[in-house]
Image: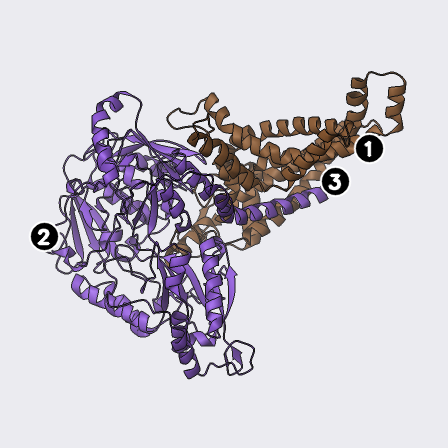
Chain colours: A brown, B purple
């Protein structure tokens, strides 16, 4: 088992190198980082030349990738624009933990990311827990009472939920529970942000502000997930071993949770395994609408301005997380299904 | 499949991530409108009186040199409307009670977060407009874009000896006893330091203009005197020198010099992100990225102490969410309100105030012979473009009549040539001009052609909904006079990309491009149409993506060094006449800043140059 894990990790290294190279080429062809640096105005010619040099954007792409990966402190860079390198560089490269400097803010990209990560996890983890919980409840319940009126009702709701655009649901939640409830004199939720400036950043404030965005994320995802659970539950319930379990007099609870659900949860584990790394990426639309200071907005804000260091930082983090959670998923498989042997 | 082949899943994830991000970027701005129409009906409208004091450009741009520039503190307060007059009475009555109870917080929503608070590091509008609160400029511009003094005893002019006769030496006299918010003296040394930092190779400042072009030396003969040696006369100094139009300001030497000495750069200074020390009615409190930042009252302020306790900026990326927050009263001032949302906000009792910041939305015509459609080089075709589009109707229908078509690039400022009117909508005349020039539909395909070249033009802009709508209207109207139009939309980082980066406008993959732009407002200077700025492989950074006209070029260069305001005004009028007659620029509409203001706020004025210039006079009625 340990050997298996080690081998998977070693395999991941060349894989990640290829991914970062492809991503670097892609992000560099997205747009011109200096195009939007001038705010509402275009940047002046003399300043464009100077900044290209100062940011190292005048170098060929493979060189830029090399500097990004291993740093440039082993070579000299041109500081005064005479075309000759005169001072050693200061970048250490990603492999030594330096993700480069954001062109937009002139701050280390890693700082920008680590500032946002806790906020995103604060939003996404409760949402993911609720999603898994409710999709299990709804999926299992529907499967056990297939074609009952409850099942039909839940099926209709999940189709509505599944086909609802996130932005629409988010705005409707805001208009109904924040704007209109306030207008009607009912207890209301806040529209945007993590807390009210007058009240300060306290735990009750943050929980109160979490309700609408978490509810939005949950409703959208439960709709889809519960269908998976229902389908695989239905498949398992009709298997011979379930009938055997019932026949040997196991309590219903044990049959459902110990035998049926454990086997039916394999597809869910696959989906959740794919989903977990994306939790780090945040929820772009929901975060934008509810002004939640998370990773999704960081990604969008810096993508719009072609800020390579930050985009690459986020992508690398997600890539690493995808590889990691794939390994974890495979380990969970082995636990859930004893027929799978990892070697 | 996924579990056994992580390769697959990773690539699929990456692609999905890209698609998702692009998809949502497309969705986010356009989506709110649908939702809004849906919910608009559900909201009970409560109409109130609203005031709209528009900044009207005064006729006398010429008088600046002779007129004595007043101190900003002596300007009259904001004109109270009926609603606010009443409010002020209430406010005064409850003033004492309010002072005892919790603080007065004005909440402003920003759709972008500041990249950096150091105004020399970004030209981002959302960053530099905050400087009025905590890092004031030595002089300011009021709601009519007229200058007033903040840190100076008088405005340098030839008459008072502040500017030498040859225009090459300027002397600035500082008021006595000014201090930074931490009590350290604010002196001429700070000015010299600012200049040094802008010019230092170690700093990646956003622009060195105007210091690299005009300034030879900055010295401090004594703590209250700054002397600036210029390389050539600099009539535009008031808009850019030490108050760079986009927010340049004096930096605190005592804070930043130790950083510079230690690291050889101030790029990484903590002050850029958390400017604990400033000079202004407020002082920085905190900044949590992605969420908010705020400023509290500066009790050591040299002018009138601010009436409110805190200005709180909430970062709110979504327009529809901003509107909801405004209506719910969770936000007091909404920024960059789009024209489409104004009627709804007014119905909900939110005041709308507008201020001309010199910005105009318009078409920049590409007439570079190597890249433009041959029709663009034909004056008759360009006139037909101007005459063939009903811009009155576009402003009426798409912008709710809240703005008007502009005749020139300089509309909304004192430099606009008043004799010029926007070209009228006259499709018959447009068709006649095209016939006359030999552009006729010889092959019966619906578009005109000449010498085997179809008259199909490329119309490029960004994906903003109002621009896309305009494109659709224009395409239809020009089709009626036989001009074919191909539409293209690019996000800002591609649209404005330079020549070397294959930007569609820069390399000329466009015949006319639409965006909103400005000169060095309130100064009229621009290098948009200088021949030396035409981009080539040798000069890829050139910013003239349009036309090189020798006569126009000479006039632009003349006005940039003409220190007699009257003569300069005449030059500017002539420039506009030439650009109008030759149709080098077609104005679409005046793009004033639109502010949404909760009626509980009083005393608010907006300057088009530096919006929050009177923040110390703002107050809240409860």
Residues marked 3 and 1, same chain: no
Front residue of A120/B269: it is A120
Residue A279, percent across and down?
A: 60, 34
In the rendered image, which residue does mark 3 sit on?
B2
- Regarding residue A274, the answer to whether it shows in the image is no
Callout 1: 10 Å neighbours few (<14), some, many (20+)?
Answer: some
Frontmost residue, B159 versus B437? B437
List x then y, in percent, for residue B509: 50, 66
Mark toward the viewer: 3 or 1: 1
Left-right relation of B143 to A295:
left
- Gap between marks 3 and 2 measured at Cα: 79 Å
Q: Mark 1 highlights which residue?
A: A235
The answer to whether mark 2 and mark 1 are in CB contact below 8 A is no
Say which element carries label 2: loop
Chain letter of the residue carrying label 3:
B
Real-space CA distance between mark 2 and mark 1, rounded to the nearest whole angstrom = 92 Å
Q: Residue at (52%, 31%) from the top-left corner?
A: A212
SS at mark 3? loop
On what subunit does the disc labeled 2 rest? B
On the image, the x and y values in percent for residue A176 come to: 50, 34
Q: Is residue B35 left or right of residue B110?
A: right
> Dots 3 and 1: beta carbons under 8 Å?
no
Other residues around mark 2 within 10 Å, as few (<14) / some (14–19) / many (≥20): few
Q: Are marks 2 and 1 on the same chain?
A: no
Give residue B536's position: percent from left, percent from top.
Answer: 44, 67
Residue B174 can be seen, yes or no: yes
Q: Residue at x 36, y 59 (%)?
A: B589
Q: Which residue is under mark 2?
A: B160
In this rendered view, identify the residue nearer to me: B436 or A61.
B436
Compare marks 3 and 2 and give the one earlier in the sequence. Answer: 3
Task: Determine the residue positioned at 42% across, 36% down.
Answer: B325
């Amino acid at each position: 088992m340990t050997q298996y894990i080690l081998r998977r990790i070693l395999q991941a290294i060349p894989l990640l190198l290829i991914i970062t190279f492809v991503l670097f080429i892609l992000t560099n062809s997205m747009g011109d980082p200096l195009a939007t640096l001038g705010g509402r105005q275009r940047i002046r010619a003399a300043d464009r030349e100077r900044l290209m040099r100062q940011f190292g954007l005048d170098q060929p792409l493979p060189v830029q990738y090399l500097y990004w990966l291993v740093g440039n402190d082993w070579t000299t860079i041109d500081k005064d624009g005479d075309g000759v390198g005169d001072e050693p560089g200061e970048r250490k490269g990603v492999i030594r933990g330096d993700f480069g400097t954001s062109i937009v803010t002139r701050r280390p990209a890693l700082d920008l990311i680590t500032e946002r990560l806790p906020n995103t996890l604060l939003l996404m983890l409760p949402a993911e827990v609720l999603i898994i919980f409710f999709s299990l409840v709804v999926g299992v319940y529907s499967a056990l009472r297939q074609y009952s009126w409850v099942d039909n009702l839940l099926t209709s709701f999940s189709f509505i939920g599944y086909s609802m655009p996130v932005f629409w649901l988010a705005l409707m939640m805001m208009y109904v529970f924040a704007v209109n409830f306030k207008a009607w004199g009912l207890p209301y939720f806040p529209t945007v942000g993590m807390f009210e400036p007058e009240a300060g950043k306290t735990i009750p404030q943050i929980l109160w502000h979490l309700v609408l965005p978490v509810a939005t994320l949950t409703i959208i995802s439960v709709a889809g997930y519960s269908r998976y659970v229902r389908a695989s539950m239905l498949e398992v319930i009709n298997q011979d071993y379930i009938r055997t379990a019932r026949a040997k007099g196991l309590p219903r609870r044990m049959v459902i949770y110990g035998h049926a659900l454990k086997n039916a949860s394999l597809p869910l584990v696959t989906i959740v395994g794919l989903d977990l790394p994306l939790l780090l990426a945040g929820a772009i639309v929901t975060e934008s609408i509810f002004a939640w200071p998370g990773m999704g907005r960081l990604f969008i804000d810096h993508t719009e301005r072609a800020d390579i260091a930050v985009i690459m930082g986020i992508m690398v983090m997600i890539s690493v997380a995808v590889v990691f959670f794939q390994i974890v998923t495979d380990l969970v498989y082995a636990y859930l299904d004893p027929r799978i042997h990892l070697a | 499949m996924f579990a056994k082949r992580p390769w697959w899943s990773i690539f699929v994830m990456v692609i999905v991530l890209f698609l998702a991000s692009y998809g949502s970027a497309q969705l986010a701005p356009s989506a709110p409108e649908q939702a809004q129409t849906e919910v608009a009906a559900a909201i009970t409208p409560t109409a109130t009186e609203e005031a709209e004091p528009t900044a009207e450009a005064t006729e006398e741009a010429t008088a600046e040199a002779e007129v004595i520039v007043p101190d900003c503190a002596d300007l009259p307060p904001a004109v109270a409307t009926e609603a606010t007059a009443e409010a002020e009475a209430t406010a005064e009555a409850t003033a004492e009670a309010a002072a005892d109870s919790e603080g007065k917080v004005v909440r402003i929503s920003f759709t972008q977060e500041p990249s950096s608070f150091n105004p020399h590091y970004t030209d981002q509008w959302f960053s530099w407009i905050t400087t009025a609160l905590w890092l004031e400029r030595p002089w300011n511009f009021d709601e009519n874009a007229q200058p007033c003094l903040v840190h100076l005893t008088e405005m340098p002019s030839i008459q008072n000896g502040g500017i030498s006769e040859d225009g090459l030496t300027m002397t600035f006299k500082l008021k006595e006893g000014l201090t930074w918010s931490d009590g350290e003296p604010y002196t001429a040394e700070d000015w010299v330091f600012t200049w040094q930092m802008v010019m230092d190779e170690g700093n990646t400042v956003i622009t060195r203009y105007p210091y690299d072009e005009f300034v030879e030396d900055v010295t401090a003969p004594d703590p209250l005197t700054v002397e600036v040696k210029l390389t050539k006369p600099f009539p535009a100094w008031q808009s850019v020198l030490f108050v760079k139009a986009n927010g340049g300001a004096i930096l605190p030497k005592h804070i930043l010099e130790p950083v510079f000495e230690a690291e050889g750069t101030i790029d990484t200074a903590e002050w850029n992100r958390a400017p604990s020390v400033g000079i202004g009615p407020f002082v920085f409190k905190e900044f949590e990225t992605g969420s908010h930042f705020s400023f509290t009252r500066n009790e050591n302020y040299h002018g009138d102490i601010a009436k409110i306790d805190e200005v709180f900026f909430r970062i709110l990326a979504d327009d529809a969410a901003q509107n909801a927050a405004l209506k719910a009263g969770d936000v007091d001032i909404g920024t960059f309100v789009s024209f489409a949302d104004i009627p709804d906000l007014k119905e909900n009792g939110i005041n709308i105030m507008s201020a001309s910041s010199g910005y105009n939305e318009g078409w920049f015509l590409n007439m570079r012979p190597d890249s433009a459609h041959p029709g663009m080089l034909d004056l008759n075709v360009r006139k037909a473009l101007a005459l063939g589009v009903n811009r009155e109707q576009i402003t009426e229908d798409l912008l709710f009549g809240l703005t008007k078509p502009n005749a020139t690039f300089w509309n909304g400022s004192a430099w606009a040539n008043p004799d010029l009117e926007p070209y009228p909508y006259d499709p018959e005349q447009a068709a006649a001009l095209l016939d006359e020039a030999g552009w006729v539909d010889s092959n019966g395909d619906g578009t005109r052609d000449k010498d085997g070249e179809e008259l199909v033009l490329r119309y490029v802009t960004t994906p903003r909904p109002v621009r896309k709508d305009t494109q659709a209207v224009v395409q239809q109207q020009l089709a009626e006079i036989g001009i074919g139009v191909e539409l293209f939309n690019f996000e800002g980082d591609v649209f404005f990309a330079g020549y070397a980066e294959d930007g569609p406008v820069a390399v000329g993959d466009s015949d006319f491009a639409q965006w909103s732009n400005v000169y060095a407002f309130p100064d009229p200077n621009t290098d948009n149409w200088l021949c030396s700025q035409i981009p080539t492989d040798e000069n890829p950074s050139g910013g003239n993506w349009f036309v090189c006209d020798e006569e126009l070029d000479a006039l632009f260069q003349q006005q940039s060094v003409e220190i007699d305001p009257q003569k300069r005004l005449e030059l500017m009028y002539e420039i506009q006449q030439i650009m109008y007659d030759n149709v080098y620029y077609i104005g679409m509409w005046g793009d004033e800043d639109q502010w949404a203001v909760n009626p509980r706020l009083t005393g608010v004025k907006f300057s088009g140059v530096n919006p929050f210039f009177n923040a110390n006079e703002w107050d809240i009625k409860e």
